[in-house]
């Protein structure tokens, strides 16, 4: 039996945030602007451009305000930023004209959350509730990201019920979108299908988004499983930029061009110009001075005329 797949899929490009923050060197602001402005003209309709967090914690994104001031994103492209706390929201509200959405985050496992933000999950939820309420009051859309939703490098498999309870708490606080993150690439398609069906049953009115990493090469297979569960919203990173400090060998997010290429071959609309997107990844290679992990960047799109 052929599984049900959506006719169209919404993709949020997170490379300028999730990708740039994981680079060992700091990318020059002017290069970030070049890439953001180019990505915003590929047909991408959702773009995460930076993170408003402490510069000493993530020096790669210390120029967040400058990026927001200088970028030239066309109307119709929804711009989001990641914030960690109320201070981050205050900074975001100083750039309200450039921002449509804020993203907040916490981990599904206690150990990862403690190592990442030095809080218990309950403490994070309490703090993020205030952030979401403040953002909604300012007219911003809110996404809550649950990291390590499919597995934790310290605790192993995470129970579905724990993920669902966190998602319900974020939704109750006012988050309109919940993203489940495979932060260290531990998910498999059977698990993805089961968890997202469980989440869909518990959160029928919330937009569910899947965020997969390609650490073990299962990213696109997990996308197929997620679509089988009725999910039509994904986050990805051009060039397969991104990653996670643990475990050793963790690679980046699924590459946006690989995702777009697969969906296009399946007849699923994304609205994204694949050659233009590949050109952005090629430019990123030139800026970084190294090859990126995207398969489509290397092989090019499928050409059935040959």
Image (cartoon, rainbow, N blue to C red):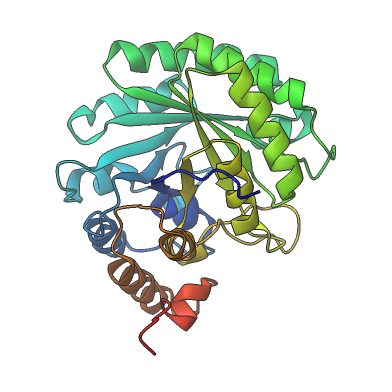
Residue at (27% x, 24% y) in the render: 93
Residue at (53% x, 18% y) in the render: 204
Q: Position of residue 176 (x, y in %)?
A: 43, 21
Nearer to me, 159 or 96: 159
Nearer to me, 248 or 66: 248
Q: Position of residue 297 (x, y in %)?
A: 44, 76
The part of the image, by quadrant, that contains residue 214 is bottom right
Q: Is residue 150 above or below residue 13?
A: above
Q: Does the image show residue 187? A: no
Q: Is residue 272 above or below residue 239?
A: above
Q: Is residue 240 above or below residue 119?
A: below
The answer to whether 55 appears left or right of 136 in the picture is: right
The part of the image, by quadrant, that contains residue 274 is bottom left
In this view, which residue lies farthest toward the bottom?
306
Nearer to me, 90 or 196: 196
In this view, which residue lies farthest toward the front?
1
Residue at (53% x, 43% y) in the render: 57
Residue at (47% x, 17% y) in the render: 205
Q: Does the image show residue 99? A: yes
The answer to whether 81 appears left or right of 223 in the picture is: left
Looking at the rendered image, the quarter that the C terminus falls into is bottom left
The answer to whether 208 appears left or right of 123 in the picture is: left
Q: Position of residue 289 (x, y in %)?
A: 44, 80
Q: Position of residue 19 (x, y in %)?
A: 48, 56
The part of the image, by quadrant, that contains residue 219 is bottom right
């Amino acid at each position: 039996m052929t599984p049900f797949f959506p006719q169209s899929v919404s993709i949020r490009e997170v490379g300028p945030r999730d990708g740039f923050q994981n680079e060992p060197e700091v990318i020059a602001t002017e290069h970030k602007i070049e890439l953001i402005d180019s990505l915003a003209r590929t047909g991408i309709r959702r773009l995460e451009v930076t993170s408003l967090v402490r510069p000493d914690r993530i020096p790669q994104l210390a120029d967040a305000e400058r990026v927001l001031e200088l970028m030239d994103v066309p109307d119709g492209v929804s711009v989001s930023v990641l914030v960690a706390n109320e201070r981050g929201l205050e900074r975001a509200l100083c750039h309200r004209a450039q921002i449509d959405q804020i993203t907040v985050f916490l981990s599904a496992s206690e150990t990862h959350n403690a190592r990442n933000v030095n809080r218990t999950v309950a403490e994070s939820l309490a703090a993020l509730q205030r952030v979401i309420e403040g953002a909604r009051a300012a007219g911003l859309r809110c996404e809550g990201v649950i990291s390590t939703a499919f597995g934790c490098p310290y605790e192993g498999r995470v129970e579905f019920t724990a993920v669902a309870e966190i998602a319900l708490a974020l939704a109750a606080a006012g988050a309109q979108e919940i993203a489940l993150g495979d932060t260290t690439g531990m998910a498999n398609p059977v698990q993805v299908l089961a968890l997202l069906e469980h989440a869909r049953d518990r959160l029928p009115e919330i937009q569910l988004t899947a965020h997969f990493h390609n650490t073990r090469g299962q990213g696109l297979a997990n996308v197929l499983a997620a679509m089988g569960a009725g999910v039509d919203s994904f986050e990805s990173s051009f060039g397969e930029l991104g990653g996670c400090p643990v475990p050793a060998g963790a690679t980046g997010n699924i590459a946006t061009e690989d995702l777009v290429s697969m969906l296009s071959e399946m007849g699923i609309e994304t609205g994204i110009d694949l050659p233009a997107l590949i050109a952005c990844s090629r430019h990123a290679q030139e800026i970084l001075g190294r090859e990126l992990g995207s398969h489509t960047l290397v092989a090019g799109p499928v050409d059935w005329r040959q």
